[in-house]
Image (cartoon, grey):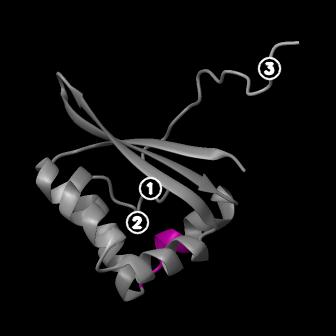
Amino acid sequence: MPYLVRAFPLIRPVVELQQFLSALSNAKRAEASRFYREYGVSHESAYLQETQHGNILIVVTLLADQEEAAPRYRAASEEFHTWFKEQVFYLSGIDPNVTPLGPPTTQMFCWPTEPDE
């Protein structure tokens, strides 16, 4: 299962990002679990990187089939899906209805996971 790695510019205060992530982990946890399962996500983690050019949110996702999930996510209009996409757009300025997999990323390096032989 390939990693999907995206870097989102954070255009809102960090506290607003924390509120969104807290909602996913708490008040909307059951909905978030269904949402992630529906798209074949087995893992998602987010990392805040503070740079001299502003904060960047780095999101790493294990997604079973990116090509299959992306158009379904783009077209999704269920209440939670809409709320989730609105939050992404509000926090980053990246519209998931336009770029459902987030900002394009090119893998430039991958250290082998197998021990040297």
Q: Is residue 114 above or below residue 104?
A: above
Q: Is residue 74 left or right of residue 9?
A: right
Crowd tier of the residue under label 1, counting other residues whose Cα lies within 10 Å: few below 14, some 14–19, many 20 or above: some
Q: CA distance from mark 3 to mark 2?
A: 41 Å
Residue pointed to by mark 2: 97
Label 1 residue SS: loop
Quadrant of the rendered image containing residue 6? top left
Q: Which residues are magenta?
A: 72-77
Which tag, 3 or 2, sits closer to the chain's start?
2
**Extreme-top residue of the structure:** 117
Of the 4 image quadrants, the one containing the C terminus is top right
Q: CA distance from mark 1 to mark 3?
A: 37 Å
Res. 115 mark: 3
**Residue 110 percent coordinates (x, y):** 65, 24
**Residue 102 percent coordinates (x, y):** 44, 51
Which tag, 1 or 3, sits closer to the chain's start?
1
Q: Residue at 58% of width from left, 22% of height from top?
A: 108
Tell me if residue 63 is in the magenta stretch: no
Q: CB atoms at circles 1 and 3 under 8 Å apart?
A: no
Residue pointed to by mark 1: 99
Label 2 residue SS: loop
On the question of residue 97 being in view, the answer is: yes
Crowd tier of the residue under label 3, counting other residues whose Cα lies within 10 Å: few below 14, some 14–19, many 20 or above: few
Q: Is residue 117 above or below residue 104?
A: above
**Residue 105 percent coordinates (x, y):** 51, 36
Q: Main secondary structure of the magenta part?
A: helix
**Residue 69 percent coordinates (x, y):** 61, 66
Q: Residue at 18% of width from left, 25% of height from top?
A: 53
Q: CA distance from mark 2 to mark 1?
A: 6 Å
Label 3 residue SS: loop
Three-letter code for the amino acid on which mark 3 is drawn:
Pro
Decide which of 71, 48 is in the foreground and name it: 48
